[in-house]
């Protein structure tokens, strides 16, 4: 029993170190620094906005209307729908909306990564925009999106990620839980990582990539988590992602448990496979170049998603209290501080994201969804060859 008690203490100490890492990033993100300059300069950079779409007739019309409202000179950006293996009226909707489109029919090689490689290769033969912007087909964007990207590029950024938010966080418990995760990562992690020069995550939606990067590296990310994979590939070449916290893109999230399970399972399995492939490379790079951004990416890959991390902390603290508690002492302070800290950390993220009352109410469903996420983690350990599956739209 003594051995088990000390093993539990070791787990708590490790979890506490992870939490200290989270706190450092949060403080770095909110530490007073240079304020973002007002968008006063005349726009200079040209963009091709690519909207990858696979049977998106339910939502793509709203996305295109949002993009057409961008407050940016019409001559400096083009909107192109990348219709990938579509069997519905996606192309007809794009045509009726007055935007350009490209059709790809390659059923032997499905997937967003494969479609982007094909599109970049075709577009670069005839076009030389300053940057490409990737927007998912179920997205509403801030009107200032291209203005912000223009400013960032003029300041030297090469890859920029917009704040990817939830379109309607109060629509369902699943949307609220997703919003909570987004609120914590965007406000308490990515801001700090970008401020410290460590690089934020690419999130698949709201990604701005300069033409020079595409010309030099192409697109070689074809896993089911192609955005994270491309981010790691760039990082291994010394290129961190800059986070544009001041501008948002809003995506639709699953509203039922089956769709939520499918989407999260894909994300978890994708991250698990990338961890196996890239962590050794990142550690080798970190030892060779002695740069913190590689070790930061290792931590990003090995630390579980926050909901699972917080759930595991709560579980082990309950094990301690029910099995090993013998009075107030070092073990007690360790576990109570960790759990209390995570609660406050979560609230801080929600406050920073200006969560509505219903989001807080929907957090009551967190234990149930945590159990579902645990089944996904088990699945990720055993499922091989998991392919991309389209998230259902409403």
Image: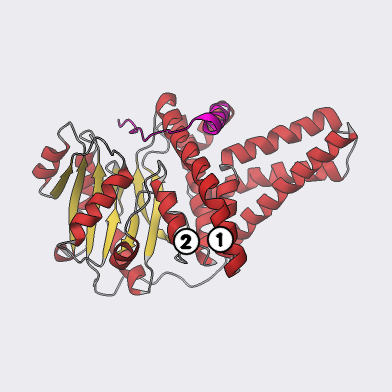
Query: Which residue in the protein does label 1 denote?
Result: 294
**Mark 2 residue element:** helix
* Image x and y of residue 286, in percent: 59, 63
Residue closer to the observer: 173 or 150: 150
Tell me what residue is drawn at x 44 percent, y 25 percent. Answer: 257
Q: Is residue 387 magenta?
A: yes
- Tag 1–tag 2 contact (CB < 8 Å): yes
Q: Is residue 362 magenta?
A: no
The tag earlier along the polypeptide, 1 or 2, is 2
Q: Is residue 233 above or below residue 140?
A: below
- Residue 343, quarter of the rendered image: top right
Instruction: Tell me the CA gap for discs 1 and 2.
Output: 7 Å
* Image x and y of residue 294, in percent: 56, 61
Q: Is residue 14 above or below residue 310?
A: below
Return the mark for residue 235. Answer: 2
Q: Is residue 212 left or right of residue 202?
A: left
* Image x and y of residue 227, in percent: 40, 49
* Image x and y of residue 204, in percent: 37, 48
Residue closer to the observer: 391 or 252: 391
The quadrant of the rendering that contains the N terminus is top right
Answer yes or no: is residue 297 visible: no
Which class describes the residues within 10 Å of circle 1: few (<14), some (14-19), or many (20+)? many
Tell me what residue is drawn at x 39 percent, y 47 percent. Answer: 226
Magenta span covers which residues? 370-394
């Amino acid at each position: 029993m003594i051995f088990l008690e000390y093993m539990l203490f070791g787990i708590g100490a490790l979890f506490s170190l992870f939490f200290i890492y989270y706190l450092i990033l949060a403080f770095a993100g909110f530490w007073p620094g240079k304020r973002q300059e007002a968008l006063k300069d005349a726009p200079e950079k040209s963009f091709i906005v690519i909207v990858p779409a696979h049977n998106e007739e339910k939502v793509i019309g709203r996305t295109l209307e949002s993009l057409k409202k961008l407050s940016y000179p019409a001559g400096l950006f083009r909107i192109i729908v990348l219709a990938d293996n579509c069997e519905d009226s996606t192309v007809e909707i794009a045509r009726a909306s007055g935007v350009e489109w490209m059709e790809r029919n390659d059923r032997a090689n499905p997937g967003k990564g494969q479609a982007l490689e094909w599109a970049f290769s075709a577009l670069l033969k005839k076009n030389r925009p300053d940057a490409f912007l990737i927007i998912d087909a179920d997205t509403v964007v801030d009107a200032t999106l291209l203005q912000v990207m223009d400013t960032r590029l003029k300041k030297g950024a090469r890859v920029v990620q917009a704040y990817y938010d939830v379109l309607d966080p109060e629509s369902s418990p699943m949307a609220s839980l997703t919003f909570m995760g987004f609120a914590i990562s965007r406000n308490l992690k990515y801001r700090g990582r970008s401020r410290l020069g460590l690089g934020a995550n690419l999130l698949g939606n709201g990604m701005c990539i300069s033409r020079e990067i595409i010309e030099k590296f192409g697109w070689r990310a074809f896993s089911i988590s192609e955005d994270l994979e491309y981010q790691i590939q760039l990082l291994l070449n010394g290129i961190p992602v800059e986070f544009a916290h001041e501008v948002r893109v809003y995506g639709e999230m699953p509203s039922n448990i089956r769709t939520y399970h499918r989407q999260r399972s894909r994300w978890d399995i994708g991250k698990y496979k990338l961890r196996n492939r890239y962590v050794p490379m990142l550690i080798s790079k970190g030892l060779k170049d002695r740069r913190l951004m590689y070790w930061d990416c290792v931590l990003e890959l090995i630390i579980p998603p926050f909901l699972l991390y917080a759930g595991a902390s709560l579980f082990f603290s309950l094990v301690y209290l029910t099995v090993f508690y013998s009075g107030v002492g070092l073990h007690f302070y360790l576990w109570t501080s960790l759990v209390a800290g995570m609660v406050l950390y979560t609230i801080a993220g929600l406050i920073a994201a200006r969560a509505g009352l219903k989001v807080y109410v929907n957090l009551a469903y967190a234990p149930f969804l945590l159990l579902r996420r645990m089944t996904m983690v088990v699945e990720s350990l055993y499922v091989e060859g998991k392919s991309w599956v389209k998230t259902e739209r409403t």
